[in-house]
Image (cartoon, helix red, strand yellow):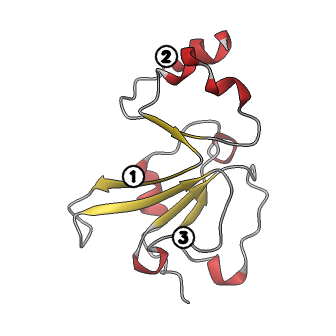
Amino acid sequence: VQKAVGVLSQIKCQNMHYIFGNHDETMESEEVKRFFKSMQDYKEIRIPDKSCVQGYQMICLFHYPILEWNRGHRGAWMLHGHCHGNLKYPEGLKNCRIADVGVDCWDYYPVSYEQLKAKFKDCEDIKH
């Protein structure tokens, strides 16, 4: 717990949401919880973005990748972890707005909204 608190106290972000994974027992301590705006298994957020038709970008957050997500057929993103960059997406998702955002996939740095927006620029909506 103390190690987690030491790392978290160095982060300069005001709106951190924690998505529980499969190895996160220590994250439920009160010392750690205070760093996060919310903690849950799944979260949908809206990032204000005037370049989006609706004025925001909807993002679904879940530790595990899922094949379909809310509003995936209308531009929403699916951001997940768990796979450490080893997952091969099924054919129907290869050009969709889904990404493994674990730090081990991004040179051990958190990925930014701008990086993801550029990655998803020419991607397609889910077809169903």
Of pointers 3 and 1, the one earlier in the residue sequence: 3
Residue 58 at x, y percent in the picture = 38, 62
The residue located at (75%, 42%) in the rendering is 22
Residue 10 at x, y percent in the picture = 49, 16
Query: What element does badge 2 sit on?
Result: loop
Question: Mark 1 to mark 2: distance in Å?
Answer: 22 Å
Residue carrying label 1: 114
Query: What element does badge 1 sit on?
Result: helix
Residue 79 or 37: which is nearer the viewer? 37
Q: Is residue 43 left or right of residue 13?
A: right
Mark 2 is on which residue type?
Answer: Gln
| Residue count near mark 2 (Cα–Cα under 10 Å), binned few <14, some 14–19, many ≥20 | few
Q: Is residue 28 above or below residue 15?
A: above
| Residue count near mark 1 (Cα–Cα under 10 Å), binned few <14, some 14–19, many ≥20 | few
Of labels 3 and 1, the one closer to you: 3
Q: Are marks 1 and 2 in contact (CB under 8 Å)?
A: no
Judged from this view, the residue extending furthest toward the right is 86
Q: Is residue 100 left or right of residue 88?
A: left
Is residue 57 at all visible to an observer of this figure? Answer: yes
Mark 3 is on which residue type?
Answer: Trp
Pick the quarter of the image with the C terminus: bottom right
Q: Is residue 33 above or below residue 39?
A: above
Residue carrying label 3: 69
Mark 1 is on which residue type?
Answer: Glu
Of pointers 1 and 2, the one earlier in the residue sequence: 2
Question: Could you say which quadrant of the image residue 67 lies in?
Answer: bottom right
Number of on-image labels: 3
Residue carrying label 2: 10
